[in-house]
């Protein structure tokens, strides 16, 4: 469940980074006081930059390609035009190219180390690459430059919470509420921090407050609050209340993936495999590349006895990510328990152990399987008795 929240917030940060660049990063003639003085930009580069902005604001891949070329041309003419580096990075991030985006944002920051937009965008990319420490450092720098940047402060609270620094996370979220008492995302982070500390009643009060304040014209945000309430009820052991909260979240926003994933998990553990399949199929219809959803879908298919289809789901995940621990473990269990490939499953369990992090929840179970399944390559035990 916590992994899902990390994915959700990564998506939120991505949206903030894009909106910060918006349809045109910034103007070379209107720089914030925090920016260093630079020589006047080359007029030809500015023309290319402004043309790129116009294309960037239009829908369609063709316009995004045109925008990218214009920004690249602007950089060729004037390498110090940091706004062009930044907007190019935004386009690269939209396309999912983390490495290229990181390079573009870093190029912008080499020119303007304290520019707010590339600091926030670079932090998001660091976060997406699993470099939470680097992301947090960038956000702290950004808050030195712009203490009123509430998006950055909420993002920092998320990272501190995920690092189990709950007091620091609460401090950042409360600073947001001082400036904006109705900030729902800050309330969500406070609720999450208290839930992580198992202070469930306090968490419930905070989330109830978020429900009261959430605007009616923001169903996606309300769905996120209801989803968090469901996670809280799961932690408290009330599966029925959790189910109802996830159901409410989906009713508010049918496209809200985390609630469908959580609903699918509840149904899967309850043995309602058909219901779980429906939830995972809804997620995969919108996000066919969601590997976690595909692994879960395979588990639900396996529960229905659809072993061939389940195997295909795990194989599709492993084609995209050969070291996906969840897919490897589920494939090994399928081999060992459902399709008469118990001996072959040893190799898959071993692949899982080689790939899985030390704290992966299935490691102990995989090791038990390896102890129980005979190794066909092991030497025979020495004979007992007989002549000397």
Image: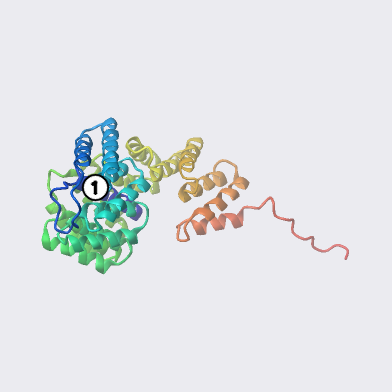
The residue lying at 23 percent from left, 32 percent from top is: 59
**SS class of the residue under badge 1?**
loop
Is 94 located above or below residue 173 in the figure? Answer: above
The answer to whether residue 84 is seen in the rendering is yes
Q: Is residue 279 left or right of residue 329?
A: left
Residue 375 image point, x, y percent: 66, 52
Camera-side residue of 352 and 241: 352
The answer to whether residue 157 is seen in the rendering is no
Camera-side residue of 22 and 74: 74
Q: Is residue 60 left or right of residue 350?
A: left
Q: Quadrant of residue 178?
A: bottom left
User: Circle 1 is placed at which residue position?
Assistant: 81
The residue lying at 32 percent from left, 46 percent from top is: 263
Q: Quadrant of the C terminus?
A: bottom right
**Residue extending furthest toward the bottom:** 167
Count numbered badges in the picture.
1
The residue lying at 24 percent from left, 49 percent from top is: 82
The residue lying at 14 percent from left, 61 percent from top is: 177
Residue 66 image point, x, y percent: 27, 33
């Amino acid at each position: 469940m916590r992994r899902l929240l990390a994915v959700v917030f990564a998506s939120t940060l991505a949206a903030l980074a894009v909106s910060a660049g918006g349809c045109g990063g910034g103007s070379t003639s209107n720089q914030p006081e925090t920016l260093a003085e630079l020589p006047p930009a080359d007029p030809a580069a500015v023309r290319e930059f402004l043309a790129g902005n116009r294309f960037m604001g239009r829908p369609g891949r063709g316009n995004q390609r045109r925008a990218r070329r214009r920004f690249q041309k602007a950089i060729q003419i004037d390498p110090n035009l940091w706004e062009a580096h930044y907007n190019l990075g935004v386009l690269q991030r939209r396309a999912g190219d983390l490495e290229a985006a990181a390079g573009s944002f870093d190029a912008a920051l080499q020119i303007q180390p304290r520019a707010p937009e590339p600091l926030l965008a670079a932090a998001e990319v660091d976060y997406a690459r699993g470099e939470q420490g680097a992301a947090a450092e960038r956000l702290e720098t950004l808050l030195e430059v712009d203490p009123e940047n509430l998006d950055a402060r909420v993002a920092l609270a998320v990272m501190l919470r995920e690092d189990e620094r709950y007091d620091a996370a609460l401090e950042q979220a409360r600073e947001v509420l001082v400036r904006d008492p109705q900030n729902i995302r800050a309330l969500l982070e406070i609720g999450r921090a208290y839930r992580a500390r198992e202070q469930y009643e306090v968490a419930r009060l905070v989330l109830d407050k978020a429900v009261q304040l959430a605007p009616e014209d923001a169903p996606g945000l309300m769905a996120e609050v209801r989803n968090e309430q469901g996670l809280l009820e799961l932690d408290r052991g009330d599966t029925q209340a959790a189910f109802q909260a996830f159901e409410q979240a989906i009713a508010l926003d049918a496209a809200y993936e985390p609630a469908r994933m959580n609903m699918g998990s509840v149904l899967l553990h309850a043995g309602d495999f058909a219901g779980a399949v429906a939830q995972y199929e809804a997620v995969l219809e919108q996000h066919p590349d969601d590997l976690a959803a595909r692994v879960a879908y395979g588990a639900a298919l396996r529960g229905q006895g659809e072993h061939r289809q389940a195997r295909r789901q795990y194989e599709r995940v492993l084609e995209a990510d050969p070291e996906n621990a969840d897919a490897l473990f589920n494939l090994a269990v399928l081999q060992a328990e459902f399709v008469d490939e118990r001996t072959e499953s040893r190799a898959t369990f071993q692949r899982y152990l080689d790939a899985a992090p030390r704290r992966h929840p299935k490691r102990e179970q995989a090791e038990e399987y390896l102890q129980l399944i005979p190794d066909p390559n092991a030497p025979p035990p020495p004979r007992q008795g007989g002549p000397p």
